[in-house]
Image (cartoon, rainbow, N blue to C red):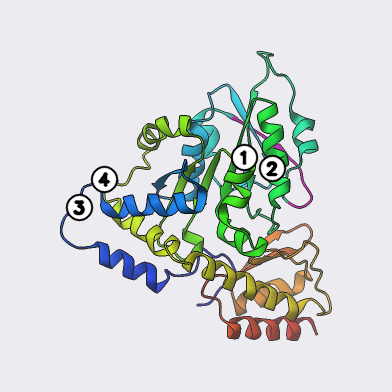
């Protein structure tokens, strides 16, 4: 089965599998005291700066919860976009696990702005209100859009002026770097982001996510938060080996660039098809077109994909590191035939 439903549907990149197999020799210290985790930590520092500390975890929800945990107390709140993964697709995990409130803001493109944050930043010092402490953004967003470094820098500046932190959910952080043409640190460390959830799974890994802490004082307690949140792997070397495979060379960038390129090939193929409204800009590896309702189910029989907004017939077509040109061309032909 080939799919445009999610980049989570894709398999594991062969080089990542080879790295896991290569780590499967002899015994190694558990819980991260192994050579592979040390190498991964060095690789993360090369991409995010000398003060960065990486803490591998099991999944993206775990990365978000653990990262947010060390920045929040139970009576505090996170400001995020209404479409944010932490608000929509994590089963209420941040609220349930941390006891904090999410203050979600409607956005047309999945992106927060300083003005949008200011519109919900009130009640500071008032015991009747959850106290805003963290701004959380997603890069790239759940709508496929990308923040520029300047946009993130403006949010970081605002956050710090308001005595808040800036958290970046980077489930598709590699796709963002590829589309922006900049290093990972250019829109994280260099512009004032405090905490990053680094996504490896959508980029060709098996189950490799990490909390990348960019504030040394928070890193001191992050290990305890990871353990308490049940996100500390005993055989850590098999998680860390995947980051070594992705980050020591340019595999992370090649995978993301390919996924992005396939999305643009799909865009080129369907943008002038009758009945297709692209709407949001295609800035990474996903398209969010509006298509006729009658075409949705027949096209889902060709390949699985999600309906993003049933009211408007907006769908999501997501490309992956292993999407082929033939996958794109076959689907484009199906779309054109169905809409003809």
Q: Residue 299, relative to residue 198: is it above or below?
A: below
Q: Residue 131 placed where, x, y %?
A: 64, 22
- Which callout, 3 or 2, points at the residue further toward the start of the chain? 3
Q: Distance between the residues labelled 4 and 1?
A: 29 Å
Q: Residue 133, relative to residue 21: is it above or below?
A: above
- Which callout, 1 or 2, points at the residue further toward the start of the chain? 2
- Observer able to see residue 304: no
Q: What stretch is highlighted in magenta?
A: 101-109
| Residue ID for mark 1 | 192
Direction front: furthest residue? 50
- Observer able to see residue 37: yes
Crowding near the residue tagged with mark 4, few <14, some 14–19, many ≥20 C-alpha atoms within 10 Å: some
Q: How far apart are marks 1 and 2 (CA)?
A: 6 Å
Crowding near the residue tagged with mark 1, few <14, some 14–19, many ≥20 C-alpha atoms within 10 Å: many
Q: Residue 83 placed where, x, y %?
A: 68, 48
| Residue ID for mark 2 | 153
Q: Distance between the residues labelled 1 and 3?
A: 36 Å
Of helix, strand and loop, which one carries label 1?
A: loop
């Amino acid at each position: 089965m080939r799919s445009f439903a999610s980049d989570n549907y894709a398999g594991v990149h062969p080089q990542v599998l080879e790295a896991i197999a290569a780590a499967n020799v002899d015994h190694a210290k558990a819980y991260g005291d192994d050579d592979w985790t040390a190498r991964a930590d060095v690789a993360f520092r090369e991409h995010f700066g000398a003060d960065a500390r990486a803490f591998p975890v099991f999944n993206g929800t775990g990365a978000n919860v653990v990262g947010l945990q060390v920045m929040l107390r139970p009576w505090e709140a996170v400001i995020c976009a209404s479409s944010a993964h932490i608000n929509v697709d994590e089963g209420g995990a941040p609220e349930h696990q941390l006891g904090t409130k999410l203050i979600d803001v409607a956005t047309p493109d999945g992106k927060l702005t300083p003005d949008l944050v200011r519109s919900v930043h009130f009640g500071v010092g008032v015991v009747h209100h959850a106290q805003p402490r963290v701004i959380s953004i997603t890069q790239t967003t759940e709508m496929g859009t990308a923040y520029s470094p300047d946009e993130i820098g403006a949010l970081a500046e605002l956050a710090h002026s308001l005595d808040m932190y800036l958290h970046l959910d980077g489930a598709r952080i590699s796709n963002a770097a590829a589309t922006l043409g900049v290093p990972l640190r250019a829109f994280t460390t260099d512009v004032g982001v405090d905490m990053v959830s680094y996504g490896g799974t959508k980029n060709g890994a098996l189950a490799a996510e990490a909390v990348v802490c960019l504030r040394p004082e928070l890193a001191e307690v992050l290990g305890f938060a990871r353990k308490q949140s049940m996100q500390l792997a005993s055989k850590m070397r098999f998680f860390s080996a995947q980051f070594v495979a992705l980050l020591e060379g340019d595999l992370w960038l090649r995978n993301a660039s390919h996924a992005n390129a396939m999305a643009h090939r799909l865009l080129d193929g369907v943008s002038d098809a009758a009945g297709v409204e692209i709407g949001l800009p295609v800035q990474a590896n996903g398209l969010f077109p509006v298509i006729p309702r009658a075409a949705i189910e027949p096209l889902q029989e060709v390949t699985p994909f999600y309906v993003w907004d049933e009211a408007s017939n907006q769908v999501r077509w997501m490309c992956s590191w292993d999407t082929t040109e033939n996958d794109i061309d076959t689907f484009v032909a199906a779309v054109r035939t169905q809409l003809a």
